Amino acid sequence: MMKIRVSFVLALLLLSSSFFLQVARCQSDSDSEDAELVAETVEEGGDLGIVDDDVQDFGIGNYSPAPGVETVCVFPKNPTKLVVAGQETELLIGMKNEGDQHIKVLAVHASVHLPFDHNMLVQNLSTQAFNNASVPSSVQATFPYIFAVSKFLQAGTFDLVGRIVYEIDQIPYENTFYNGTIEVVEAGGLVSIETVFLVSLGISLLVFLGLWKTKKGPKVETGTRSVDASMDEWLEGTAYTQSKASKLKKKK
C-alpha cells in the first residue's frame, strides 16, 4: 500500500511539472510567431509619423474592416498578458496592407470589459492618435500603444478590446487587433508561471514526505480458540467428536 501511495505522488509531480512546462511552451510559441510578424513590420514600415495623445472622436466602433487589411497584436516581454493596475502597459500592433491603395492610420483605442458580457464596460482607455502615419500597399507596419487601467480596478480577469481606425481614399475603416483576456493584478502582486510551479512542487513534496512517514497499521491476528469452536460445531456427531469425548472421560 505504501508503494502505491509513493508511486501516485511521483506521478502527480511529473504531471504537474509537464503541465506547467507545456503551458509556458505554448505561450512562448504563440507569442514568438506574433513577435516575428511584428519584427518584420518594424523593418519594412519605416518612419510611421509622430505619436500623439488626442481626445478627438474618431467614431471608433462604428466602422467595418477594409478588405486586404490584417492586424496582429503582441505584448512584448509579457507573454502572460499581466497588467498591473495603475501602471503603463505596452503592446505592439502589426498591420499588413495587401490592398492596392495606401492606408492612413488615424488612431488606436482600447476598452476593458467584463469577460462574460462585453456590454458591461469597465473602463474606456486612452485614444492614441497618429500624425502622418501611413501604410503603403503590400507593406507591413507596426504601431505602439501604451495604456493603463485604473489603479482602483480590482484584480482579476477582464477582456481587452483594441481597435485601430484608418482611412483608405478618405473612407474610414476599423480593425479589431485584439479581443481577448488580460489578467489585472495589484502592484507588487505579480505571479509568474515559475512561481505557481514552485509552489505546486513544494506542496507535492510535503504530501510525499507526509506519506513517507506514515506508519503501517497494526496486523490483526486471528485467534485459534474461535477456529477450534467452529470446527467442533462442524464435526459434532462424527467419529471425531465421539473419540474426543471418550478421551475426556478417561482423563477424569
Image (cartoon, rainbow, N blue to C red):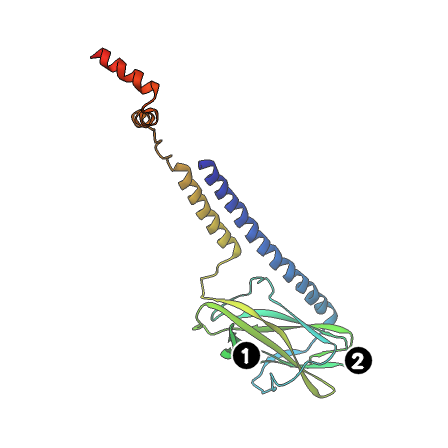
Residue 132 location, x and y as percent? 69, 81
Name the residue: 34% across, 27% down.
Answer: 234
Name the residue: 52% across, 50% down.
Answer: 16
Residue 158 location, x and y as percent? 51, 71
Q: Inspect the image, locate mark 1, and give the three-letter code of the amino acid beneath it.
A: Ser
| Residue nearer the viewer, 76 or 3 | 3
The residues tagged by marks 1 and 2 sit, at their Cα atoms, a distance apart of 31 Å
Q: Secondary structure at mark 1?
A: loop
| Residue nearer the viewer, 169 or 68 | 68
The residue beneath circle 1 is: 126
Locate residue 96: give its quadrant: bottom right
Q: Inspect the image, locate mark 2, and give the three-letter code of the amino acid beneath it.
A: Asp
Locate residue 214: give its quadrant: top left
Name the residue: 52% across, 53% down.
Answer: 194
* Looking at the image, residue 167 lies above or below residue 15: below
Query: Would residue 131 be seen by someone viewing this image from the given angle?
Result: no
Labels 1 and 2 touching (C-beta < 8 A): no
Query: Would residue 158 be seen by someone viewing this image from the given angle?
Result: yes
Q: Residue furthest left?
A: 252
Q: Which mark identifies residue 38?
A: none
The residue beneath circle 2 is: 100
